[in-house]
């Protein structure tokens, strides 16, 4: 299908702004650029409450922002631990704020947005170790933060989707927590970048193949030979049985499209209830642009319906 007209307009605006490509920027410059692009998501939605806490991690305290859903609540709501995107190098609580609010209100869950450490200051394996520690602590202390410990999900977009998939594997293999669902939004699952969409959508659709090389270079650092490890590329895990049910959302014009869908097929083959939903005409990052893109609104609704169904939210 052709690009969605709203997406075309957005890409034209970005091109006209003279925004440089990531590989031309230093890490601080790239982080500053992402912060400047954040307002494209539009005004944020009100929730019942927001609270900043810290949880213990292997490298020190990890900041977490809790969002409580608006509307009537009958008993403790479920918990969604959200891991933001940004190629393991970019992003923070501020850039994830709008998405976390929409997920909380839409799903009826307390959303715990994790400000995990970033590469290259904290290269592999620091990120997934911190994310797993945060998810485990939040699940074990769900009652203390006002959530239901029996209804815990994990989710993330892009690199956050990668980390959510890795955390799900670790939770299975390391004795918990017992996760009810994984929401993987255009996740990175193949650090070898070996799928056709990485070539078909290499340029011109916001996320580029060269940008992915830039991200992986900073994330893996001196551990480039770990690219096929399941904690980097969950697609290459030998066994995907015993994982939580999943919704995987992909975008037609995204370099990561095929690897996300390939992971969905592997989950299905392992007997995991998994829905794979491709949004035609959309690009990487579209879920975070719900105010500008109708496709983002539809994907957000699908994600929230899936979460409510999996978590039994009212």
Image (cartoon, rainbow, N blue to C red):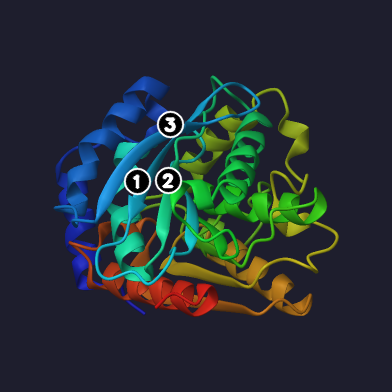
User: What x and y, as percent, mark residue 116?
Assistant: 51, 34
Whichever of labels 2 and 3 marks the residue nearer the N terminus, that label is: 3
Quarter of the figure with the C terminus: bottom left
User: What x and y, as percent, mark residue 103?
Assistant: 35, 62
- Left/right placement of residue 194 relative to residue 207 reads right
Residue that label 1 marks: 96
- In terms of depth relative to the viewer, which is nearer, 207 or 247? 247
Mark 1 and mark 3: Cα distance apart in space: 23 Å
Residue farthest to the right?
A: 238
Q: Nearer the viewer, mark 1 or mark 3?
A: 1
Residue 64 - label: none
User: What x and y, as percent, mark residue 59?
Assistant: 62, 22
Q: Is residue 294 above or below residue 172?
A: below
Q: Can residue 90 be seen by looking at this rendering? A: no
The residue depicted at 26 percent of the width and 50 percent of the height is 49
Q: Nearer the viewer, mark 2 or mark 1?
A: 2
Mark 2 and mark 3: Cα distance apart in space: 28 Å
Residue 113 - label: 2
Mark 2 Cα shell of 10 Å, populated few (<14), some (14-19), many (≥20): many
- In terms of depth relative to the viewer, which is nearer, 94 or 238? 94
Mark 1 Cα shell of 10 Å, populated few (<14), some (14-19), many (≥20): many
Helix, strand or loop at disc 1? helix
Helix, strand or loop at disc 2? strand
Mark 3 Cα shell of 10 Å, populated few (<14), some (14-19), many (≥20): some
Residue that label 3 marks: 23
């Amino acid at each position: 299908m052709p690009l969605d007209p709203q997406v075309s307009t957005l890409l034209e605006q970005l091109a006209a702004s003279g925004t440089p490509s990531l590989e031309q920027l230093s890490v601080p410059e790239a982080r500053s650029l992402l912060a400047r692009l954040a307002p494209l998501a539009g005004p944020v939605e009100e929730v019942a409450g927001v609270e900043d806490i810290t949880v213990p991690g292997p490298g020190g305290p990890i900041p977490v922002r809790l969002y409580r859903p608006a509307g009537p609540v009958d008993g403790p709501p479920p918990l969604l631990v959200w891991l933001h995107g940004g190629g393991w190098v970019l992003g923070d609580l501020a850039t994830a704020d709008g998405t976390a609010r929409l997920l909380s209100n839409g799903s009826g869950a307390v959303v715990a947005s994790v400000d995990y450490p970033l590469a290259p200051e904290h290269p592999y394996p620091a990120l997934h170790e911190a994310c797993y520690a945060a998810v485990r602590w939040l699940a074990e202390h769900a009652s203390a933060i006002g959530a239901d410990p029996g209804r815990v999900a994990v989710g993330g977009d892009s690199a956050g989707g990668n980390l959510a998939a890795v955390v799900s594997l670790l939770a299975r293999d390391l004795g918990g927590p017992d996760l009810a669902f994984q929401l993987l939004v255009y996740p990175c699952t193949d650090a070898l970048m070996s799928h056709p969409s990485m070539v078909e959508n290499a340029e011109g659709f916001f996320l580029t193949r060269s940008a992915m090389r830039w991200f992986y270079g900073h994330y893996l650092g001196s551990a480039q030979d770990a690219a096929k490890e399941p904690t980097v590329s969950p697609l290459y895990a030998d066994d995907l049985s015993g994982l939580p049910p999943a919704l995987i959302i992909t975008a037609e014009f995204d370099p990561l499209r095929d690897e996300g869908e390939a992971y969905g097929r592997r989950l299905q083959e392992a007997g995991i209830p998994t829905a794979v939903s491709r949004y035609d005409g959309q690009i990487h990052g579209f879920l975070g642009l719900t105010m500008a893109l109708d496709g983002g609104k539809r994907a957000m609704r699908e994600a929230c319906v899936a979460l409510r169904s999996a978590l039994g939210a009212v």
